[in-house]
Amino acid sequence: MRIKEADAYFKALSKEVQTPLVLVLTGGIAAGIMAAERATDDIDFAILRYARKSLPEIEALLQRLAEKRGILIQYSSDIGRWSSVSFLDWKKHSRPYTRQGFLEVRVLDPYYWSIGKITRGTDRDLKDLEAVIRRQTLDWKKLAALWAKALRKSPPSTALFNVRKQMEGFLVDAQGGIFNGDYDSDEAVAYFRKLLIPKKRSRG
């Protein structure tokens, strides 16, 4: 599936939805919008704002239009529940994509979007992450700080330990112009590890 097919889906949705609805795109479709387009298997999104009493009708409409076009959709009112790592305050961080009628479609902020990609950590996810970092010129310090915060805010688990290794591995391998400027992987990993240590509260 290509972006133009997703756009056609949103256009059809906007013609039928009868109450204000906000969708926030993430996953591969968001990667295609923020960086070089590639085919994706489905449309991943959050339902951010909607009339609760209308949710059954909205869900039926989402599914009907997707099936009509042979599109797979995955959605949740809280995409943070898809991950073992906290998405923090992701609901406050998205960018406008399109607005038609009662429908507003947004794209998850690339820094917050990156949490899901590095958590899954497949080859495709890492390629998406590299492409978005380059195209959106993400700052490595801001990225490392957000990843460290996400880990600190997540419940301990074996999955969390593995995600930390994936994050460090990405920072080690992030050479070849992924980040702008004079990027030093040793400095990045040291900075990331330092931020993982909880700050001591001062006694007043």
Image (cartoon, rainbow, N blue to C red):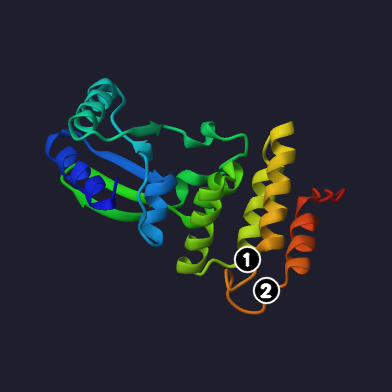
User: Which amino acid, by three-letter code, is at mark 1?
Assistant: Trp
Q: Which of 97/130 is in front? A: 130
**Which residue lies most toward the bottom here?**
182
Q: Amino acid at mark 2?
A: Tyr
- Let me know if residue 155 appears in the view: no
Residue occupying the point 20% across, 34% down: 19
- Numbered circle sitting on residue 183: 2
What label sits on residue 140 in the rendered view? 1
Mark 1 touching mark 2, by CB under 8 A?
A: yes
Q: Pinpoint residue 6: horizontal percent, then vertical percent.
A: 26, 46
Residue 100 against residue 61 in the figure, above or below:
below
Tell me which numbered mark, 1 or 2, is placed earlier along the sequence.
Answer: 1
Rendered view: 89 above or below 128:
above
Q: Quadrant of residue 178?
A: bottom right
Disc 2 secondary structure class: loop
Label 2 crowd bin: few (<14), some (14–19), many (20+), radius 10 Å = some
197 left or right of 60 in image: right
Please tell me which residue is depicted at 23% across the width and 46% down the height of the picture.
Answer: 5
